[in-house]
Image: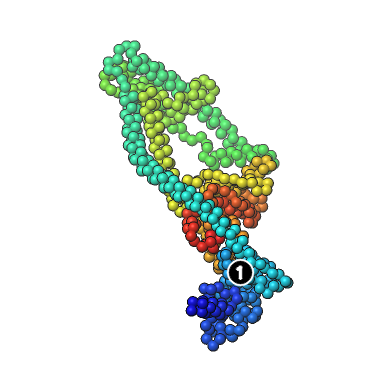
Amino acid sequence: MQQKRTLFLLSFGILAAASIPRGVSPEDAKLYIGSAENYFSCLTHPSISIPISSINDDFCDCPDGSDEPGTSACASLPPQNLSIRGFFCRNKHHTSGFLPLSRVNDGICDYDLCCDGSDEYSSVGGVQCENRCREIGAAARKLAEERHRVKSQGSKVCDELVKRAGIMRKEIEDNIKTTKVQIKGMEVKVRNLNEKLKETQLRERNKIVKNPEPGSKVTVAVQLAKERVEEYKSLLGNLKNDRDEAERKLDITESILKTFKDEYNPNFNDEGVKRAVRAWEEYLAAGNGVGEKNAAQDRDLEDIMNEDGIDWEDIEASTVNDDLASIYRFEEYIPAGARNWIHEKLAELRQMMVDNGVLAPPKDTNGESKAVVEARDALKAAEKENEDSRQKLKSHEEDLIKQYGPSDVFRPLKGECINREFGEYRYEYCFLDRAHQISLKDNSRVSLGSFAQIETKDDTSKNEASGVFESGWEEAHQEPLSGMVLKHENGQQCWNGPKRSVHVELYCCAENEIRSVVEMEKCVYQFEVGTPAVCSSEIKSRGQNVKDEL
């Protein structure tokens, strides 16, 4: 009885297998068996029906290619029009897969996708493709084990990077809080030091001794001030005489020029004379002619030179707190009309004497006392410290909003550099920083760009939309790209071209490495860089299908 049941199930299985057209996967079998009235409707164009016998007859009847899953008859259709994934290869002892229709019965053994050789069932050109799935499957499983090991290591390193990134971010946030508190304290300190400076300046200016004895510092200072005032009065008289003499000579010169202009013959063709006359006219037009003298100013100057408006004895005998600084600034006792003019002339005279080596250059303290200098230096130091703290705060706040990838995973890698030689150059890449091309001949460096932004693209969906089929195990030895791209821009200008730039395509790797460098177009480079930072989302369990690993 058991033997009859086994024979029945075997016969049923053979019949079911025979009813599934060649090139159709088991999961798609239901689309091809049990059709009503032995007709098949095109999968994406159900209005088109053909006899079951027309399936795999090597003639493309359906616009979606669904009637020729086991031949290359519909291979010329655009990939986006196809409703089938290709020719199904069972590949026992390995991973089943789909082969592009154009490679069915093309006389080539496509072991990368169809290791059982079932795609060359017609033996075109006498080609016989043996079944190599046992051998290839073993190699693929070994590769999958190695890939899983690398991803596991990369995932552990990635987790460490995320932890370090969290710690670094927390440190920055704490620094921001601390710096804000420091800034508030420094602002109070600056205000206090500013007040202290004002108080020190006032105190130093008001320093005076009551009832000074003859020969005391105040008496000596008063005597020196009196002598200095006499010197300034004498100097002021000299300056006034020099001014009057200059004005007298200017009057004579202008009179000569006026007579020259009025009496010269304009018909006499002398360019030098004409230029002189034009220059005189322009001089007058600009308002440079001698005007009326300022009589009030002259009276003030005469008063200063001829009168002594300072009671020196009263100053020496004073017992109140007067402003000692005013003793040395005799200009305060000069009428307001002449004060600014005298100050300017004296400043010019001092500068002339300094330029000619007669006087030494003024000190940086501008004659300030030691206490005032110390107070001012303390204020400047506090202001600088406050400004440094503000710059530090700004830097930390900007750093928190910068792109560092998911969970700030690239934060610990920033500035870490790797390099590799390709041809005549060594390429250096520093994460989230700069990329360089270094000549092996003369060690010259060319900037390929600075970090600009992080982009993410979905290569899988892009490939499927373009009709790209899955790669076989032999094409999958290299770890696929993660879809995360670090863009670097504004590198060194290319001759007769754009500024250099780099797209850094990342893939999962246990250690940081550069896998390849390609110049995609003029001065636009593509780096394939491996890093644990993109391994986190790619870890698979060891029990998953090997196909997922590939």
549 or 287, nearer to the observer? 549
Task: Name the outermost residue toward the top.
Answer: 214
Q: Residue 143 placed where, x, y %?
A: 57, 56
Residue drawn at (61%, 61%) of the image: 135
Name, please, the residue furthest toward the front.
1
Q: 307 or 49, which is in the foreground?
A: 49
Disc 1: which residue: 99
| Residue 433 appearing in the image | yes
Q: In the rendered image of this protein, does residue 502 appear above or below residue 298? A: below
Residue 458 x/y as whole percent: 52, 62
Measuring 56% from the left and 83% from the top, which residue is drawn there?
40
In terms of image quadrants, where is residue 310? Answer: top left
Residue type marked 1: Leu
Give the position of the C terminus as an image quadrant. Answer: bottom right
Residue 503: % across, % down: 57, 54
- Left or right of 290, for residue 166: left
Q: Is residue 105 above or below residue 236?
A: below
Q: Quadrant of residue 15?
A: bottom right
